[in-house]
Amino acid sequence: MWFFSEEERQLQEVVRDFAKNELLPRAEHHDEEETFNLEAFKKMGELGLLGITADPEYGGSGLGATAATIVMEELGKVCASSTLSYLAHAILCINNIDKNASPEQKAKYLPKLISGEWVGCMGMSEPDYGSDAIGIQTRAKKEGDHYLINGSKMWITNAQYADIAYVYTRTGDEKKDLSTFILEKENGHFQFGKPIHKMGMRASPTGELIFDNAKVPASQLVGEEGDSVSHMMKNLDIERITISGISLGIARACVEQSVRYAGERKQFGKEIGSFQLIQKMLAEMSTETEMMSHFLYSVCKEYDNGTQGPAVAARVKLALPKMTTKIALDAIQLHGGYGYSREFPLERFMRDNKLNEIGAGTNEVMILIIAKDLLRESRR
Amino acid sequence: MSDLKDEIIKEVKKFRQSVIDPIIESDDENEVFRMEIFSQLGELGFTGMTTQESYDGAGLGYTDFCYFLEELSKSSVPYAVTISVSSMVQSIIQKFGSDEQKSTFLPPMARGEEIGAFALSESGSGSDATNLKTTAALEGDNYILNGSKLWITSGGIAKTYLVMARTGENGPKGVSAFIVRDGDPGFEYGKAEKKMGWRTSPTRELLFKNCAIPKDRLLGHEGDGIKAAFSGLDAGRITIGAISVGLAQRALEESVKYSLSREQFGESIFNFQGLQFMMSDMEVETTCARLCVYEAAKLLDAGTPSTKLSSISKLKASDVAMKVSTDAVQVLGGVGYTKEYPTERLMRDAKVLQIVEGTNQIQKLVIARSIKSEYN
C-alpha cells in the first residue's frame, strides 16, 4: 500500500521470504496429513513475529494492526492454516495477555509465548454457545485462594499443542458475570478433548479444552471478576481485522496464480487469457482484491490511530472472507480440472478461506452487529 | 409412470441410507471406492437403466434415470457419477457398436459386474477436446494406440474404456473411437489424481504405449470418434444436472434440519430472518434447477432433444449446487465446516460439477451459439 511506512515495507519483505522458504515447501503436505508445522511456528518466534503487537519490555515488537495484518496477508498467501494458528497464538493469546493482564502475569507468560517456547490458544466458544458467546456456561467457582473450573471449550485453534490457554468462564448468574483466566497445561488446568477434522485449515489443529474440577490459583484471574466482556470487546476488532488479512492473502494468491495460468494454458490454439470470459474473471477478481486491500489497510491505520468507527471491523470481516470465497471458486473454475486437483493449491485456498466466513464471528453475526450500529445511528 | 418414479426413489433412498451413509465420510477421507456398492446397485437394476433389455439393461428413459441419480446423489455424488459415466459408455456402444460388440461388452456393464469409462480429455486438450493427440494406427489385424488420456473418471476400476484416438487428419474428422479393455497389452494406468472432492471416485491417467487391440474394437467407422463421443453430450449434461439437483437438495435438507434443532440467543436459529431468507433462496434455486433438468430429460426421451436446454440444465444446476452447498456450510457454521456433518463434503463435491461435461464457460458458448441461430 502507498501509505505503508518503511518499517512496514521491510516487514512485508521479510515475511514474504519467510513464507516462501518455510511454509511453501510443506503447505500441501501438512494439509494432506492434517499436521501442524511446529517447526515453522518456532521459527516465527526466532524471527520476532509472534509478539508483533506485544510490549517490547516483554520481548514484543510493539506494532499495531497494520503490521499484524501485513504478516497475515503474506503468510496467508502461502499457507492459511499456519497463519490461522499464528493468529490464535499472537492475537488471541499474546495480544490479549499484553492488553489485559497484570505486569506479573505478563512477565511470567509473554517472554516464553513470544519466543515460541510455549504455544498459546484462546477459549471462548462452547458446544452450545457459538454466536451467542455471552451465554457461555463453563463455570469458575471461587473456593478460598483458588477457583474450581468445570465445563468445556469447543473449536479451539491450537488446542492440542497449547501450553497456555486464555479462557473465558462464568463466575456469576447475571448475563455478563464472566471472568478471564490464564491457564497452564503443565499444572493440569485443562485437558484436551477430541481433535476436530475439518474441510480446510487442516494444518491448523482444532480441538476441545476440557475442565474437570480444575483447581486454579486465584492469581490466574485476569483483572477482576466480571471483566471478560470488556476484555472480549477490546480484542474482537483486531481479531476480525487480522483474520480478514488471511483472506486478502488468499485472494492475492488466487489472482497471481490465475493470471499466470491464463498466460500459459492454451486451448483452441491460443492462450485462454485471450478469451473475454477469462478476461472478465481476471479483471473482476483483481479489482475486488484491490478494493479489499484498500479497505482493510485503511481500517488498520484507523485502528492504529484509535480513530476507527463503530462496527467498521465487522464490515471488513463481512466483506473480505465472503468476497475471497467467490474469488477462490472462480480461480478453481479458471484452472478447470487442474484447479480441482490437490496438486494445485487453488482448491486448498478455497477450503481454507471458507472458515473465515465462520470463525471469529460468522457473516451472520457481522450482519447483526452492523445492522445494530446502523439502526442505533438512525435513532439518534 | 409415477408409480415407477416412487418405487425408484424409495428403493434408492433405502439403499443409500443403509449402505452408503454409514461409510461415506471415512471413505471420502481415505479415498476408497467399493466395487460391492456398485455391484449391489447393479443387482437392483440401476447400472444400465437406459440400456436395452436385450443387453440386460432396464430399457428406461433419461427421466427415470435422473430420478435415480438425483436420489443417489443425496448420499454420494461419486457413485452417481460412476454410474452415469458407465451408462453413457453403454449408450454410445449401443448406438455405434456392431452386434458383436454390443452383445460382448454391454451386458456385464448393464448388470453392474463391470464399469465403463470414457476417455476423451488429454493434458493439452480439455475444453478444446477435438484437438486430441493420442494416435491409433492400423497394422495388420490390430490398431496400435500411443498417447495418454487425463482426468479419466473410473480409471483403474473400469474394465471397458471408450477411447478417442486420432486415425487421420487434424481436427474432429480424423478421430475414431475404440473399445480398450483393462489388461490389453501396452495399456497402463498413470498417476491417480488427488482431488478436492469426488474422492471416492478414482480419477486416473491412461497410458498407451504401443497398445495393440484387435481391429474389431473400432467403434463404427474410422472418423466416427467425435460423432460418437458427442452423441452422449445432451444426456451427459442432463445427468450432471440431476446429480447437481440431488446434491443441492441434500444441502438444503441438512440446513433446515440443523437450523430447527440449533438454539442460540434462546431460540431456534431457523427463526432468524437472515437464515430463513438464505434457505428460501436455496429452495427457489433448487426447484428452478430441477424443473429445467426434467424438462430437458423429457425432451430427450421424446426424441426431440434440446442442446440449448441440456446446456442450461447443466450450467444452472451445477451453479445452484455450488451456491446452495456453500450456503449450507454457512448455515451450520462451525459444525458445517467439520467432517461430522456432510455439508463440507457436499461443497467439495459440488465444485467439479461446474467443470466436468464441458465447463460452465463452454456451456455459455453453446447457449450463445444456439440463441444466435434462433434470432438470426
Image (cartoon, grey):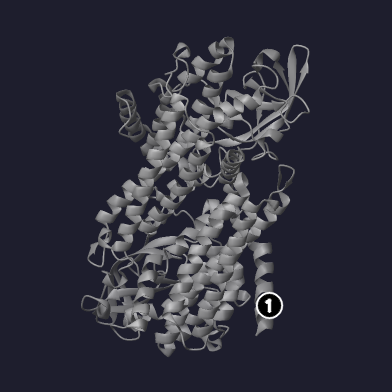
Q: Is residue A218 left or right of residue B45?
A: right
Residue A87: x %, y % from top left: 49, 31
Bin the neighbour count of mark 1 within 10 Å (Cα to Cα): few under 14, some 14-19, many 20 and up. Answer: few
| Residue A72, placed above or below residue B193 | above
- Numbered disc 1: secondary structure: helix
Pinpoint residue A196: horizontal percent, then vertical percent: 60, 41
Q: Residue at x 38, y 39 (%)?
A: A294
Q: Which residue is mark 1?
A: B6
Residue at horizontal 43 percent and vertical 46 percent from the top: A349
Image-quadrant location for residue A28: top left
Residue B39 location, quadrant: bottom right
Residue A177 visible from this viewpoint:
yes
Numbered disc 1: what chain? B
Quick one: quadrant of the C terminus of chain A? top right
Q: Nearer the viewer, residue A331 or B148?
A: A331
Query: Does A152 sit left or right of A50 as displayed?
Result: right
Residue furthest to the front in view is: A380
Q: Between residues B182 and A144, which one lies in front from this camera angle?
A: A144
Residue B145 vertical position relative to residue B332 in the rendered view, above or below: below
Residue type pointed to by label 1: Asp
Q: Relative to residue B359, is residue B42 drawn left or right?
A: right
The one nearer the camera, B271 or B240, is B271
Q: Residue at x 48, y 45 (%)?
A: A319
- Above or below, A258 against A271 in this view is above
Q: Is residue B27 visible?
A: no
Quadrant of the drawing holding the N terminus of chain A: top left
Picture quadrant where residue B53 is located: bottom right
Q: Position of residue B287 (x, y in %)?
A: 59, 69
Residue B48 on image: x %, y %: 54, 79
What residue appears at the point 68 percent right and 30 percent down from the top-left corner? A210
